[in-house]
Image (spheres, rainbow, N blue to C red):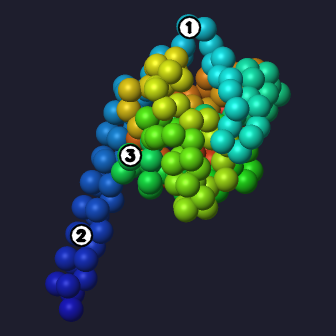
Amino acid sequence: MAQIKQRLVGWAKNILIYGTFLLVVSNVISYLRAPEPPTQGYAISGTTLQGGKVTPESYLGQPLIVYVWATWCPTCRFQSPAIEALSKDYPVLSVAVNSGDDESVRKFLDENGYTFATLNDPDGRLQRMLRVSAFPTVFILDGEGKRVMSEVGYTSGVGLRLRVALGAER
């Protein structure tokens, strides 16, 4: 019995060590892959698939989460539920890149129960303006529209909420 307990403690210790290492490495990789802010700023504009108008002034005075994703991206399928939950408490503007026509993206959003505001970017124009090269990419902008931080790849819902809360304090 003591031998089994010793093994379980050893496994738990290894899981904690390797989990911490993986967390640190993934955050370093995310930091290194994060795009530089666009020289012209975050001048995102257009009409969302839900019919709302977006201008650079639309979200001033409040933090904004900009979520750049694609329907064909496997990691985005894991990230999108956390973004949906976040959109209940914070403004979210998503950009669906190279994901088909408006109707295809609308269908994807409806099938998955996503209600966050979405701009369709079928030709990658916004993707290039935002300098995004990997999906998903999440930008957190402050109330003045300046980037506070960005993440590339999967980030947990708790991690996103913490980053938004930290960004809102700036």
Q: Quadrant of residue 167?
A: top right
Q: Position of residue 127 (x, y in %)?
A: 48, 25
Assign a secondary structure to mark 1. loop
- Position of residue 87 relative to residue 1, above or below, is above
Q: Quadrant of residue 59?
A: top right
Residue situated in front as seen by the camera: 39 or 50? 50
Assign a secondary structure to mark 2. helix
Residue situated in front as seen by the camera: 100 or 17? 100
- The amino acid at mark 3 is Cys
- Position of residue 61 relative to residue 23, above or below, is above
Foreground tag (2 vs 3): 3
| Neighbourhood count class around disc 3 (C-alpha, 10 Å): few under 14, some 14–19, many 20 upward | some
- Position of residue 49 relative to residue 33, above or below, is below
Assign a secondary structure to mark 3. loop
Q: State which quarter of the image contains the N terminus.
A: bottom left
Instruction: Name the residue located 57 percent from the left edge and 31 percent from the top edge.
Output: 139
Tag on residue 73? 3
- The amino acid at mark 1 is Thr
Q: Position of residue 83 (x, y in %)?
A: 59, 50
Foreground tag (1 vs 2): 1
On the picture, is 22 further left or further right than 116? left
| Neighbourhood count class around disc 1 (C-alpha, 10 Å): few under 14, some 14–19, many 20 upward | few
The Cα–Cα distance between marks 2 and 3, rounded to whole angstroms, is 33 Å
Residue beneath disc 2: 11
Counting residues from the start of the chain, the first of labels 1 and 2 encountered is 2
Counting residues from the start of the chain, the first of labels 2 and 3 encountered is 2
Instruction: Name the residue located 75 percent from the left edge and 23 percent from the top edge.
Output: 55
Q: Position of residue 119 (x, y in %)?
A: 61, 35
Tag on residue 39? 1
